[in-house]
Image: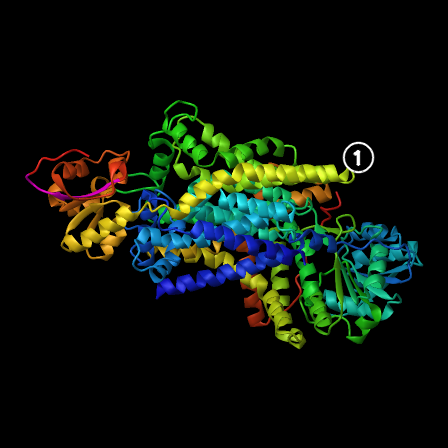
Amino acid sequence: MNRRRDLWVLGGLLPAVLLVQGWNITGYPAISADEGTYLAQARAVAAGEGLAHYTYWYDHPPFGWMQLAVLGWLPEVLAPDTLRVPAARVIMLLVSAINLSLVFTLARRLRQPRWAAGLAVLLFGLCPLGVALARQIYLDNIGLAWILGAMALALCPRRDLWHHCAAGACAALSVLSKETMFLLLPAALVAVWQGTHASTRKFCVVAFGCGFVFTVAFYPLYALLKGELLPGRDHVSLLGAVGFQLFGRDGSGSVFAQASDASRTVDSWLYQDGVLIVAGLAALLVAVFFRRLWVPAAALAVLTIALLRPGGYLPSMYIAQALPFLALLVSGCTALLIGWLLDQRIRRPGWARFTRRTLVITLACWAIAGISPLWWHRDARAMTVQANSSYSECLRWITESVPADSRIVVDDGLWLDLSDRGYHAIWFYKVDLDPEVRVQLPRGWRDVDYVVSSPMMRYGPERLPTVDDALRHSRIVATFGAGSDRIEVRKVSRYREGVTR
Amino acid sequence: MLSLAIALISIVLFVIAIANLYWTLHAWRTPANLRNTTFPAPDGDHSLSFSILIPARYEEAVLEHTVTQLLQSGHPDIEILLIIGHDDFGTAEVADWLAYKYPDKVRVIVDTNKRKNKPKALNTALPYCRGDIVGVFDAEDLVHPDLLTHVDYAFRATNATVVQGGVQLINFHSSWYSLRNCLEYFFWFRSRLHLQAEAGFIPLGGNTVFVRTDTLNQIGGWDPSCLAEDCELGVRLSSRGHKVVVAYDAVLVTREETPDSAASFFRQRTRWNQGFMQVFRKGDWRRIASFRQRALARFTLASPFLQAFTGLAAPVGLIVALVLHLPVWVTLLSFLPGIPTLAQLAFEAAGLHDLGKLYNLKIERAHYVKLVVAAPLYTLVLAGAALRAIARELVGRRDWELTRHVGAHLT
């Protein structure tokens, strides 16, 4: 009976949240570099070409896009004429549905009342950051599903040894989907601890450890068997890539330093959705005193500490893995507060029942009135703004005006679309960094026919001399959009000196 | 072709090892499971009478201690029947003295069979049992005084035909194999047997086993030609639908020692394996109605062999895949059977910790190291014993190789 009511609540909330997340999913937000990369890698997996469309260099573990590969056919059936990357976002809607359901389940298993679990779903699903991030093809969203699943399994009331083993495997799959999920492992361990009985805890912890270690191990094992575990001459390596991700990348600076990349990223999060972040961090301070909030509290605490460490690289989607726990903390603390206010057993002289109820209702109205205009405004933007029309127009122009089999250097937002239409598309990033691609271009920029210059290409952090040369020796033949977001199609001429990028 | 074969073998081995691990960990699967493995608290009533059978062959060193200990039992209505071979004068002397000392409680039964073994000895004594319940102990067992009171209540509370109590090897520090041997018993009696009892197919243990006397007489006692008479009796009873209850309690458990040398351990294993084969061939288990139970029966009786050969075949498959440069996915698959094997080691470490806590034993870091380091050699010995059992069964050698006891668990 209880479970059926849970299903009714979740079944009512899920379509509403998914409607907000799904409406205009192709139009907003603008295509980001990673989306195209992961999708192209998924395509390579599905086609049996290997783990990536270019040489796989262990930049991320491949399990995330292997899952995308399984559902890769879906967008091509649903929206064959839309740009590949935005169309593929429909897959993320499915992932989001799983994440929302798991947040609800987790809230219930953390002994939050049904309405609070519903609140967590609304906070997680409707906060503007959540809406924007859930739409994008980010491995974080996929990894999140597995780690939330791991926690839900670990807190299963049956306290079954094999559920803990499965939880360990899920945690491993989460890390294999996106390596930063490793930061959520301590929270998963708290869940294991709380989800076990003292008499069988030892065995359950071992089961979790076995599930985790023996699943994760297949990744380094794969690298070892390919002879790509240790760095060496003339080949990519897992440890080399890990070293690069941890130490080789330019740091984003301190969060507290003015005008550092990290502080800009944090500012943009706060601009998009300060409410949930601030409320969640405040709830974290309260949560320390309540056992039942320790799982989300541990998650958020570790993520915050990792964020504050100076000098690391801070990707903009880092916040994605914090959102469900922010939501769970806020809903959990709200439940505690309201439970305390309405508790009949506590005597409060002079406090009539009526007064207490009025107080609760007033608080609720105040919170809703405070948040909803802000969220309404941003979510409405997500549901209406067309941020990818330049890409669509650009693609249409190229198919009409550029001869097939031309060599076009593009970003990953268009790579799949152009490759599918018979062009020799080259991902700009690989022109200088992948030896195999350099072999295809023996005369460097002179072998390139067109360059599609997009914001991703112009503002990328890497130095790419061949791409720069191609840009310098080209002229604009078509422009789409305006200002810094414009997309230019440039024809490369062997004899021309042009502008730099 | 070779790739496919290696992949297939790896997956089969993986499934076998996982199933084995799943059953081994039955007791710890949920807290409820663990609670159900203990004896129910007795009501203090002693309405059943017990006949305790102790077959003793060349056991003069330990017999007196065992009987004295048994006589301190809190149960008032017991008799002890010592079964002594007509040619074993040393043990007979101790037995006669005990019968003289406790004339109301202890009797000596002389086993005059020309070729002696444990089932024949037990069958010799069966007609002389006066109690409602026949219990079997070995001459070197350490029995807790309250055990019979608990068994008495377990019979009455569950209306079972058989109650199997826990047996625990305790001298984990004696030799390189004793630690693993102790843990094997721990996992078997603490966990696996309970699953077997629930599933309705159970190979019983050799001692601390209690059967209603009338049932035992009805089915004609033990099979005198079987090398694993305990297993055989359990299979025969459970396949005829008799209810078997297993209870494990660290305080009440019967304490034993491991075989005194690796050779003796090897012979004991050979005998058990050969016994399992005999039970399998005898086919009483085929009378079980449900397909699932029959499948479990097949798997249980074959498991000493499966276990031995997965231990050997898994590394061989891995080496073949590595040496012959098979495709990466095949090599990855050939690592699969290693997973449950390593997981088992991890769970054994947890079990060792549990064992130390339950029995107040001082488990040190070196013991965990020993647990891991001894694993390959132990597997090799088990595999050797399995092979030897098959060889002996093929040439028809079915004589009883006795396990000698020195009393290492008494100190």
Q: Depth check: give the residue in front, A377 or B85.
A: A377
Query: Is A244 left, or right, of B257 in this rendering?
Result: left
**Circle 1 — which element?**
loop
Q: Depth check: give the residue in front, B379 or B59.
A: B379
Percent x, y of residue A396: 22, 53
**Which quadrant does the C terminus of chain A fall into?**
top left
Output the chain of dot 1. Answer: A
Would residue B355 be seen by someone viewing this image from the given angle? yes
| Residue located beneath label 1 in the image | A347
**Which quadrant does the N terminus of chain A fall into?**
bottom right
**Image: magenta residue range:** A486-495
Q: Is residue A242 above or below residue B71?
A: above
Q: Depth check: give the residue in front, A156 or B81.
A: A156
Residue type for callout 1: Arg
Query: Is A21 left, or right, of A55 in this rendering?
Result: right
Percent x, y of residue A362: 64, 37
Choose top left, top right, bottom left or bottom right for residue A132: top left
